[in-house]
Image: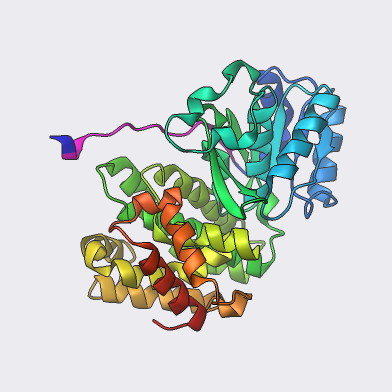
Amino acid sequence: MSDYSGNWNYPTTIVFRPGAIRELPDACRRLGMQRPLLITDEGLADLPMVRETLAMMEEAGLPTGLFADVKGNPVGANVDAGVKAYRSGRHDGVIAFGGGSGLDAAKAVALMAGQDRPLWDFEDVGDNWTRVKVDGMAPVVAVPTTSGTGSEVGRASVITNEQTHEKKIIFHPRMMPEIVISDPELTVGLPPKVTAATGVDAFVHCFEALCAPGFHPMAEGIALEGMRLIAEALPAAYDNGQDIAARSKMLAAASMGATAFQKGLGGVHALAHPIGAVYDTHHGLTNAVLLPYVMQANRAAIEDAMLRLGRVLGLDNPGYDAVFQWVLSFRERLDIPHSLTDIGVPGERAGDIGEMAARDPSAGGNPIPLSPADYARIFTSAVEGRL
């Protein structure tokens, strides 16, 4: 019965409601924090939500530092600088605040706060995670402000190695934040383009989890419901960022996507990681562009999954063709570009991208094995906008 076995780990404590940010001081105290460090990306540092959060923490008797030297695609140097700030400020915990870049960087800083090995020694390869000195890890409260990566319920961080121009997955089971504060009100200010890109990113997480091989009915159920919620709520959130019901559904769906993809990801992410590392593209937008091209390559292996998804989406004549056309229409509805050229990605390094994609850990979850040449062909098709 080996086809019906698996090791399943599911998420953490989540405080989910409008206004939940007011519970952040209590969450920090529950984890023993007295001097936390709030880590976010450089784009959020000066926004009112960050200033107001720091003021709230100060008023609650929890003086909180701020570290925001984090790029949109965080790099190892960002993590190193964050660790230096954590240690020099004598902090005792991390508030991971923001979208995927801020959350990933913050979790990596919390991991590295008490380690004596370099970050790359904890890449998600083999049993590297066992090298971690668990007692040196800092506690983390996560506060997501976008509805995309779901990093708030993830056990890993994606960090770019600037020397090799590769995105590396840094993993340890204890990297999962112990408490998540999910406040939909923090997402109402997202611009429409960011709403669309991050929202389709969450959809891709659910989609690839559904299609990944293996027996994991809990992940598949969460993935299907996540895609149903996104299909319903993302256009509404895109049209009206103040729609708190749509924002709530999207925030939940993002966490659902990251929960579901414990089953696996696939070729979309395998390509998006090197594209982002080499060309510094927005991760969610890159996924959104790539999805139909990878669908075409995987068609023979995902027909049954598309029948199920088509039914959940309420499509006429559910099946691969109906879902494929729905994906194209959904992207168009959200003004997602059709080709990689449209987001500034040239095609001359197809061979290199193909090689890196085939080595990416996400490739292991693709429903069929794809060679470097296969990935190079998909990449070229996506550059040219040719389906």
Residue 189 visible within the image:
yes
Q: Nearer the viewer, residue 349 or 225?
A: 349
Judge whether residue 8 is colored magenta. yes
Judge whether residue 159 is colored magenta. no
Residue 99 visible within the image:
no
Image quarter (top left, top right, bottom left or bottom right) of the C terminus: bottom left
Report whether 126 appears left or right of 31: left
| x, y percent for residue 167 | 57, 51
- Count of numbered labels shown in the rendering: 0
Farthest residue to the left: give it. Answer: 1
| x, y percent for residue 45 | 82, 48
Residue numbers of the magenta segment: 3-16
| x, y percent for residue 284 | 56, 61
Report whether 194 appears left or right of 214: right
Q: Nearer the viewer, residue 61 or 206?
A: 206
Examine the rendered structure and indicate whether residue 74 appears above or below residue 232: above
Q: Residue at x 59, y 77 (%)?
A: 346
Report whether 209 appears left or right of 146: left
Q: Residue at x 59, y 56 (%)?
A: 247
Quadrant of the rendered image containing residue 299: bottom left
| x, y percent for residue 137 | 63, 23
Image quarter (top left, top right, bottom left or bottom right) of the N terminus: top left
Quadrant of the rendered image containing residue 136: top right
